[in-house]
Amino acid sequence: MKKFVIGNWKMNLNVHEASLFAAKLAQDIPIRRGVETIICPSFLALEPLSLQIDHRQMKLCAQNCYWRDSGAFTGEISATQLRGLAQYVLVGHSERRNIFDEDDREIRFKVQAALRNGLTPILCVGETEFEYNEGDTPHVLNDHVAGGLLNVGSDQMDDVIIAYEPVWAIGSGKTPKLEEIEKAIELIRTQVAHMFGKSIAKNVPILYGGSVNLTNARAILSVKGVDGLLIATASLIAPEFVGIVEIASELVKKEGEKG
Ligand code: 13P
């Protein structure tokens, strides 16, 4: 199965800096079958980068979208407006949930808006440190997955990606134990299986995000069920990001050799 390596640049780099950084990545990221390399720049940089990058080498992902297609929503950007600029869109990132108070209802509307407009939503789910300490991770994951994917049709699930991002691991340098990541991914797949059946659950790509770097990427990517990585801090350091793409590529090649 192919692996995803996604760089979420968050609210960093102006348009010029984004262009220079993408050019730097382009020098070192070869076009590889088996690894989908995706960058998530600011909305402003999507258009220039969509003209600049080789789309066989890297794809573009928006960091957010509004769920209505058009209208009097000052300051918002719809999935309709992102068509042709990005192929993917992050939905329900923990910063959207926690800083901008997005709830599961809004998040599911965004998932549907993305699908309606031909974008692949990357639904982010994950527990806070408090929830982790309370042993609430399974409930939170169930709620986030069920809440985000309610009303999605089985036929649309080919175009959905889920990212497990424990909030306490984001930007903290802390990561869950590998067996905890495996367990969380398994819980997410089980919830998807309840909703859409086993075969869809087996095929939905599930990524891990939270303090991924060049040192831990191989181990995390090798965890059973992990189909890719969603990276912020390390994605803004070219050798780290490129190195992680290389690791993903090696692992895909090894898996292919094993059959
Ligand atoms: P870090 O890689 O900085 O921990 O952030 C992860 C993240 O939020 C990706 O969306």
Image (tube, rainbow, N blue to C red):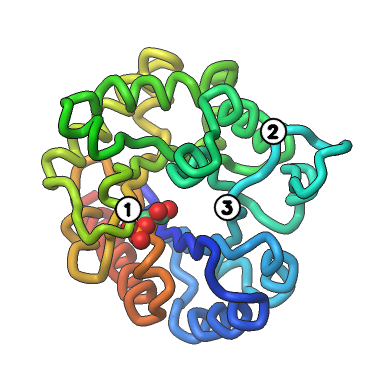
Residue positioned 53% across, 81% down in the render: 21
Quadrant of the rendered structure where residue 113 is? top right
Q: Secondary structure at mark 3?
A: loop
**Gap between marks 3 and 1, in whole Å?**
16 Å
Q: Is residue 252 above or below residue 49?
A: above
- Left or right of residue 205: residue 132: left
How many callouts does the rendering have? 3
Residue positioned 74% across, 66% down in the render: 47
**Dot 2 or dot 1, earlier in sequence:** 2
Q: Nearer the viewer, residue 194 or 72?
A: 72
Residue positioned 33% across, 51% down in the render: 209
Which mark, residue 113? 2
**Dot 3 or dot 2, earlier in sequence:** 3
Residue depth check, mark 2 versus mark 1: number of the one nearer the observer: 1
The residue at which mark 3 appears reads as 63
Which mark, residue 180? none
How far across and down, in percent of the image, does residue 181 sit? 20, 41
How far across and down, in percent of the image, does residue 188 sit? 32, 28
